[in-house]
């Protein structure tokens, strides 16, 4: 069938298998150009199918030669309906990894569940013995508590008072103001349950309890801070509260891993186009302006560039354990938050409107990156041809 993008807000209802494969191939090519030697041998990536999780897996496998297990929750194809982009990404990753004699196992299921944790534990025990690195890069709108069965849903809201600010309708290239009412206490708690550190902690407890973690194991989770423009809806909002809980979990995991010399680390990454970031009000408009500024200064980075830098230098390479912030976090957002970059963004922000959106921002670049998440817009793919879904 011929597949074209069908976007609705921050998602695409279709994904292109050849395009997703091409996107994975491009990231692999970058990782292979920046190989590094001090890499872990066996890696578990939880949330491995898109964004920073997929880029982590690619960087570690094709840059560092690691064997990987990828855990994700994606939709396979059904009759004439294409699979999700994450499904096609993971199929492509496994194909290319095996062509390079790298072990790559995919487990598709709810990573929050005890069943999937058991599947992973059995696989590690049978095939890998010990895990040297655990990447936690899970983003989800909801989570079912594995013990009580209660379903929690995350929200993207400010805390304490309403927020009014600019955002963009990417489908219409329209800048407009949005007002979001503050979250209730229950919504804050639910967002922490979904996007906080509890599940990361449960994963590490399960793996440690089964003695499947190697001495000196490193586990890393990802966070974001961003500029003051986004703080009411992000850093000081419900997602920010969840990220605070991630810090709490890091300390608990550090204590847990003390007997095997393990480390629990948080990396604060740069703003990039992902399915998760596209869903956050204000952020797509901010990213569009940021991209224009950073591209003009030739310091723009996407997911794969960030993750190659993280694993080749900050986590395992020459800068491992160095240049941490006051809270002990790795900072990959250093270019984004540099004063001259943020001054340039702040200068544009009050001026930007529907009329000058294309002039003052890289909205077209944002949309290209967004479509690429779903396998569209690659020059290497002929989208007029039939493709097997």
Image (cartoon, rainbow, N blue to C red):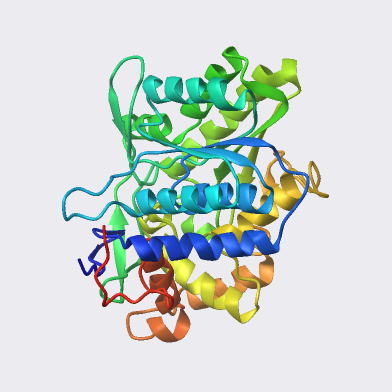
- The answer to whether 41 is drawn above or below residue 49 in the figure is above
Q: Residue at x 48, y 26 (%)?
A: 120
- The answer to whether 387 is drawn above or below residue 189 in the figure is below
Name the outermost residue toward the left.
79
Name the outermost residue toward the right.
318
- The answer to whether residue 191 is seen in the rendering is yes
Residue 382 in percent (x, y) is at 34, 77
Residue 86 in percent (x, y) is at 38, 50
Q: Residue at x 63, y 47 (%)?
A: 60
Q: Nearer the viewer, residue 146 or 171?
A: 146
Q: Nearer the viewer, residue 361 or 108?
A: 108
Quarter that holds the N terminus: bottom left
Q: Nearer the viewer, residue 227 or 60?
A: 60
Q: Quadrant of residue 124?
A: top right
- The answer to whether residue 233 is seen in the rendering is no
Is 49 left, or right, of 109 in this rendering?
right
Quarter that holds the C terminus: bottom left
- The answer to whether 134 is drawn above or below residue 166 in the figure is above
């Amino acid at each position: 069938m011929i597949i074209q993008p069908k976007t609705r807000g921050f998602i695409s209802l279709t994904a292109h298998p050849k395009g997703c494969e091409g996107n994975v191939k491009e990231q692999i090519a970058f990782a292979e150009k920046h190989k590094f030697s001090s890499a872990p041998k066996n890696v578990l990536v939880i949330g491995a199918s898109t964004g920073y999780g997929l880029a982590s897996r690619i960087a570690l496998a094709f840059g560092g030669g690691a064997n990987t297990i990828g855990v994700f929750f994606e939709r396979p194809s059904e009759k004439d309906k294409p699979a999700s982009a994450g499904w096609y990404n993971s199929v492509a990753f496994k194909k290319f990894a095996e062509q390079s004699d790298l072990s790559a196992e995919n487990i598709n299921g709810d990573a929050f569940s005890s069943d999937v944790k058991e599947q992973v534990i059995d696989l590690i025990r049978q095939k890998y013995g010990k895990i040297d690195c655990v990447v936690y890069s899970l983003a989800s709108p909801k989570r079912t508590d594995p013990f009580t069965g209660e379903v929690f849903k995350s929200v993207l809201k400010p805390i304490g008072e309403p927020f009014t600010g600019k955002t963009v309708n990417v489908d219409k290239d329209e800048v407009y103001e949005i007002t979001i009412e503050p979250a209730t206490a229950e919504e804050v708690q639910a967002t922490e349950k979904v996007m906080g550190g509890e599940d990361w902690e449960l994963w590490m407890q399960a793996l440690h309890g089964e003695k499947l973690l190697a001495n000196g194991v490193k586990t890393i989770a990802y966070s974001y801070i961003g500029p003051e423009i986004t703080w009411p809806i992000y850093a000081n909002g419900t997602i920010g509260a969840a990220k605070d809980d991630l810090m709490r979990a890091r300390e608990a995991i550090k204590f847990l891993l003390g007997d095997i010399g393990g480390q629990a680390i948080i990396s604060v990454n740069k703003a990039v186009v992902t399915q998760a970031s596209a869903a956050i009000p204000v952020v797509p408009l901010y990213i569009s302006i940021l991209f224009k500024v950073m591209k003009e200064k030739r310091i723009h980075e996407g997911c794969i560039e960030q993750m190659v830098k993280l694993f080749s230098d900050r986590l395992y390479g020459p800068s491992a354990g160095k240049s941490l912030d006051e809270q002990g976090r790795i900072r990959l957002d250093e270019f984004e938050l540099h004063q001259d970059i943020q001054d340039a963004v702040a200068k544009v922000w009050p001026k930007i409107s529907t009329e000058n959106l294309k002039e003052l921002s890289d909205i077209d670049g944002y949309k290209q990156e967004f479509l690429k998440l779903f396998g569209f817009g690659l020059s290497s793919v002929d989208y007029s041809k039939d493709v097997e879904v």
